[in-house]
Amino acid sequence: MNLGVIGAGYVGITTGICLAHLGHKIYLYDIDTEKINKLQNRKMPFFESGLQKLLESGLDSENLKITTNLNNVIQNSDGCFVCVGTPTKENSIDLTQIIESIKAISESIKNYKKTKYVIIIRSTVIPTTSRNHVYPILKEKLSENEFALCVVPEFLREGVALEDFMNPDKIVIGSTDKINSLWVEEIFKNFKDNCEFIHTNFETAELIKYTNNAFFSTLISFSNEISNIAENLSNVDPYQILEALVLDKRITTNKNNFKIVPNLASYLIPGCGFGGSCFPKDVKAILNFANLNKVNTPLLKAVLKINDERPQKMVLLCESILHNLKNKKIAILGITFKPDTDDTRSSPSLDAIKLFIEKDATISIFDPMIKTMPIELSSFQNCTIAQTIEDAIQKSDAVLLFTKWPEFKNIEGDFLKKLMKTPIIIDGRGFLDEEKFQKGTFFKMGHSK
């Protein structure tokens, strides 16, 4: 099929590259000429495992065309995925990019006299967006015979987006017309034998995406609430408590004496909180939507409140150990919000770093994926990026681990003792082996000091 992808951000690039790999003719469009030039020159604007190779093969096969010419996209395609950003603005979703994209697409459809051109909303949008905001624009500018509208949310996790796209557990298609739904289903025909196709309406499709992200955010904050309780008790291990929870037969199934532990177990681990471009943004957006509709949502409010507290708890734990943070050198290991990505958006480490700096500490950061200072920290003079883990922790007073990079897994006490003033490490992810550290040098969230 000939398809356009509007918006060369994380979702758009991943969607476009993967669809081209499946054999579709894809026209990937963005107004950002710098980003488009980079892609045309075979360079990914972000890191995502496996996509660089598929970008190159897509360009070589000519299944993937990359352009700043929207008219060219619409002229040569039968439908397009709208993958533009929907950022949070004052805790509510900002639909500016969606609205402007739909207006531009409409004009191009009109100019090229397209019929039944299928516009597929891939961006994460709150319920009623497609019906109340997108559809009226299309109806105003186009006749019923010129367009069709569908909603197909994405469920891509950063770090494993290629795997998620190529091995989906579900394809959700929101539409008002069965013919349009089946047309969209044909795009994903390669997956028919291995995943569920959910045909529904606009609003249900939109809310499914938010429900996914809100659910996994809730698991993380639930784990951290148990951690809060445990740290006020002597000799209570919240990690062991949650490991025991996961063994419950309603979570872990047992088939022929073989335990099948679900992936959601990875969200039931205490730590320094969630971050990234989706969970914080989407929980805030659905909270605001609920508030506008006069729906009380105490659970989701608590999810965000608990999460917002986690970086501060890391800093306070460090302060209680060192007694004073002024002029102390603090080494931060990992500032991406998770491993296998270069995304630092809403990373808990950034909030912690700002709090340390407020307390006059000096910060040295090491992250294997980040070699230059993130813009959020660029104004701080007493904050530097180290190029090696050794440089980061050299003569430091404490080390705080925020990201579960494999490079950090084998850190042990003797290594710290050689480099630090006094070996103190705080594991914010429950990632390290406590047995590898001398007593009184290793701390983690949820344990009483």
Image (cartoon, rainbow, N blue to C red):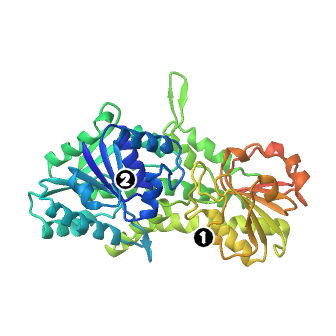
Which residue appears at 81% of the width and 42% of the height?
435
Is the residue 436 above or below the residue 69 in the image? above
**Residue 242 visible within the image:** yes
Residue hosting label 2: 66
Compare marks 1 and 2 and give the one earlier in the sequence.
2
Q: Quadrant of residue 433?
A: top right
Q: Where residue 369 sits in the image (x, y, percent)?
A: 64, 53
Q: Is residue 97 left or right of residue 355?
A: left
From the image, which quarter does the N terminus lie in? top left
Q: Position of residue 390 (x, y in %)?
A: 81, 53
Question: Would residue 180 appear left or right of 63 to someone viewing this image?
Answer: left
Q: Quarter of the image holding residue 62? A: top left
Q: x, y percentage for residue 245?
A: 58, 44
Residue picked out by circle 1 = 375
The one nearer the camera, 320 or 151, is 151
Q: Dividing the picture into quarters, in which one does residue 274 lie?
A: bottom right
Q: Which SS class for mark 2?
A: strand
Nearest-to-viewer mark from 1 and 2: 2
Do labels 1 and 2 touch, CB within 8 Å?
Answer: no
Q: Residues within 10 Å of mark 1 (few under 14, many from 20)?
A: few
Q: Secondary structure at mark 1?
A: helix
Q: Label 1 is placed on what type of residue? A: Ile
Residue 363: % across, % down: 76, 68
